[in-house]
Image (tube, helix red, strand yellow):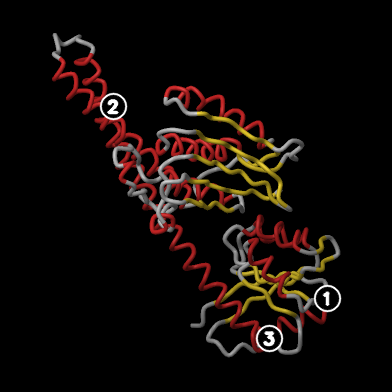
Amino acid sequence: MKPKIRVLVVDDDTVDCMTAKRALLDCPYPVNFDIETVGTLSKALDKLDSGRYDVALLDLGLPDSMGLDTVKRAIEAAKDVPIVVLTGLADDRTGLSAIDMGAADYLVKDPSIGGMLGRTVLHALERKKVELKLKEALDAKADLVNMVSHDLRIPLTAIKEGIDIVLGGDAGAVNDEQKDFLTLAKRNVERLTRLITDFLDYQKIEADGQQFNIRQNNINELIEDVHRTMEPVAKQKGLDFRVELEDGLPKIEFDYDGITRVVTNLVSNALKFTAKGGIVIRTRKDGGVIEVAVSDTGCGISKDDLGKLFQKYGQVKSAKAKDVDSTGLGLAISKQIVEHHRGKIWAESQLGKGSTFYFYLPA
């Protein structure tokens, strides 16, 4: 028996609906298409929400909705139902924008559509199956990581508390040599705890499970917050730490906590790798983006290391930084956060002459 595929055609043009129906019914592939048509987006949203359909064909010019907003609303209602966009405009940019928003594919309405429509629908369904299987695998991986990490955190917390009790003298007198060993053990427990936290965060963002609160914010205010927080550390190291912020920058959309983490990571790295001199955070508007730069007078980065900076566990191999404590995930996490905001992050450096890390966000 041929498998049945339930198709919802969303188009107010009777001729186009009949053309789509004919193309699917004449499809040479071993499937049966059960086709239903509606002429408005509002009716389509109600039907898509029912979960009765396997795929939807969506026209972008409907009586109650026009353009890419139609795609956005349909995808929100369709959940896991693939959407194939049908457009009367021979404009690849519109079709590619629809795919970028989550559509499975797009076709331009013309006489040749009949030979391609059935194949496009079947390919969209196969891609959706693969996506769902991949999502299931990623969810299973995330669950395993969370479980293992949780099981590791509990004994680590107990170990740290036990070390604190002994270091504090509550379990008896501790000589200087014993204190040194215990302090080293405590530092390594804390580092392992940070590594687990960073690893969990990286996996969560990578699996698209991190929830970002995107809203209008002032990037200069965020930089000032980070500066106030990190300035005591810079002073303790005898470093000059200042900001140079362009006045009048417009508010832009970003997750405040997420971008704070990015800037904090960059400043933390600068503090770790800078023995003398200072650190500067700058902001400026450059065309349609706002750029943030964190510069330092530290040990610099070789050309070989620059290409590895934003990879998982990528660490600088500078001899001057060999004792720096790092999980190797901070820059990888920063890259994920910035790219989630449709931005870009990169670094420029010369060994022995300091580094500048840049990122920009759409304005």
Task: Determine crowd level at label 3: few under 14, some 14-19, many 20+ residues with C-alpha closer than 10 A.
Answer: some
Nearer to us: label 1 or label 2: 2
Horizontal and vertical percent position of residue 281: 58, 37
* Residue 120: numbered disc: none
Identify the residue shown where x is 42% and y is 36%.
Answer: 274
100 on left or right of 158: right
Horizontal and vertical percent position of residue 266: 49, 40
Sequence-wise, which precedes: disc 3 or disc 1? 1
Residue assigned mark 2 = 157
Residue assigned mark 3 = 23
Q: Vertical placement of 53 versus 180: above or below?
A: below
Q: Amino acid at mark 2?
A: Thr
Identify the residue shown where x is 60% and y is 77%.
Answer: 121
* Residue 13: numbered disc: 1
Q: Across the whole image, how many numbered discs are drawn on residues?
A: 3
Task: Find numbered disc 1 in the image and state the secondary structure of the residue it sits on.
Answer: loop
Sequence-wise, which precedes: disc 3 or disc 2? 3
86 on left or right of 338: right
Residue in the foreground of this view, choosing between 101 and 323: 323
